[in-house]
Image (cartoon, rainbow, N blue to C red):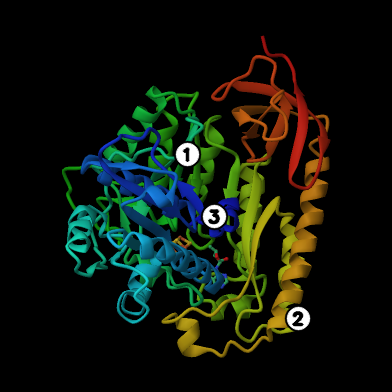
Amino acid sequence: MNWENKEIDESVQGTATMIEGETDGLKKLYLESYGCQMNFSDSEIVASILTKSGFSTTRNPLDADVILLNTCSIRENAEQRVRNKLSQFNTIKKNNPALVIGILGCMAERLKTELLEQEKLVDLVAGPDAYRDLPNLIDTADSGQKAVNVLLSREETYADISPVRLGKNGVNAFISIMRGCDNMCSFCVVPFTRGRERSRDPESILNEAKELFEKGFREVTLLGQNVDSYRWNITKKNEVIEPSKPTVSFAQLLEKIALVNPLLRVRFSTSHPKDMTDDVLHVIAKYHNICKYIHLPVQSGNTDVLARMNRGYSREWYLERIKAIRTILPEASISSDIITGFCGETEEEHQDTVSLMKICNFDYSYMFSYSERPKTLAERKFKDDVPEDVKKRRLNEVQTLQHDLAFKNNSAAIGKTFEVLVEGISKRSSDEVYGRNSQNLTVIFPKENFKPGDYAMVKITESTSATVRGIAVNNN
Ligand code: 5AD
Ligand code: SF4
């Protein structure tokens, strides 16, 4: 999913996320989230389930009765960070043997035996579809037994659970619209860690968006590993499941959410190039409040590499999708994910990625060097044969190029005026606020009387490759 975003690399470091407001006398939970936005969104579901069963939260792991890490398996270094953290938490347990340490999320299924039985780093393991079982699992762990539930479900969407909002600004929120992934990209561990694709009831999504708006939120991001394959009441073969009820596609869902209120911005993530249709682009064009920003991971610019990756599209197909975006949504920004040094990648194939990035003129890219993951198609079929130093050199090359593209694109914003949704006070100066424009560009400008949740028209005056600055204009 979008996946991955800026959040990913920041979050790989680990962000402690907690429920606001502590309640004395109850059991205390310390919850930390790694990985993608979907994982962060899952932590909000976990927080909701455990608050209902009497937990309060703490920012301090030393105060906790239960420590849970919501983990990521996407690359090896993400897993390594979690292991280091677990070792640290186990030193706390030496002085507090009643402490329960657990892992949730993507590492759960992969490493349950290793972490629970061999290395004895955890007391509890719960996979992404097992969060309703957490209160029981914690009881089991409390009684001194090992607690495990890593069953993957074909139905679980947590549709009825109202997430506790852990992001603190009260302006943006994630709404999970589907879970799992059926794509089987050969490099990717997600189908194994998160299971089969399933879509969430559109009514529950709509209600969540309405409630968020009423509580003052002004932006929702619809999350799914592949939002374009969202479908309700209709099978992949286009067979209607219950003929008396309406079917809902992603384009239709997007439209329903846009209609909640014109002041509620809608984003979504992630689109898949093989599935992204023009009807989604037309819905985006029709509504001012659907953000003009598309995250369309390409992974490689070479058709043979894309075939080895099992992505289901060619270089030409991807470029045609970019053309469709530029035609239907001329003001949209586009970002991508790129992997360097995938199995068998030659220098020429790598250069195809470089040339494609230039043609597409991405505003942002999330770039990674290939990291072989257990059980994946690539692990079984191909040799991880690009030397580490070559992978890193190619990564460096695409990063430098992306930096240049972003710098040029951001410089081109100077003099233009954008509608910015204010998200908070700037970290560097309390006289400034920051927010994003529809194109997902972060804009910093003088605070005046603006507060989080306000919209401001801002004229851009300065730029770097990461952010731009401006001044508010025509705001009465
Ligand atoms: N190695 C490197 N990068 C990966 N990604 C997914 N799996 C791997 C892997 N094994 C990247 C892809 C994906 C993003 C979320 O992470 O670019 O789109
Ligand atoms: Fe998110 Fe899991 Fe994928 Fe990590 S491995 S990015 S947590 S879905």
- Label 1 CB, ligand 2: below 8 Å? no
Is any atom of residue 263 visible in this view?
A: yes
Q: Position of residue 366 (x, y in %)?
A: 63, 59
Q: Position of residue 309 (x, y in %)?
A: 54, 77
User: Which of the 4 image quadrants contains residue 48?
Assistant: top left
Task: Give amino acid for label 3.
Answer: Ser
Q: Is residue 152 above or below residue 472?
A: below
**Contact, CB < 8 Å: mark 3 with mark 2?**
no
Task: Give amino acid for label 2.
Answer: Glu
Is label 2 in a helix, a strand or a loop? Answer: helix
Compare marks 3 and 2 and give the one earlier in the sequence.
Answer: 3
Q: Nearer the viewer, mark 2 or mark 1?
A: 1
Compare marks 2 and 1 and give the one earlier in the sequence.
Answer: 1
* In the foreground, 446 or 421: 446
Residue designated by label 1 = 167
Residue designated by label 2 = 348
Compare marks 3 and 1 and give the one earlier in the sequence.
Answer: 3
Q: Position of residue 263 (x, y in %)?
A: 50, 24
Of the four image quadrants, the one with ligand 1 is: bottom right
Is label 3 in a helix, a strand or a loop? Answer: helix
User: Which of the 4 image quadrants contains residue 99?
Assistant: bottom left
- How much space separates mark 2 and mark 1, taking CA atoms? 43 Å
Disc 2 residue crowd, few under 14, some 14–19, many 20+, Cα 10 Å: few
Q: Residue at 33% across / 45% down in the picture? A: 47
Q: Residue at 52% across / 41% down in the picture? A: 282
The circle drawn on residue 11 is 3
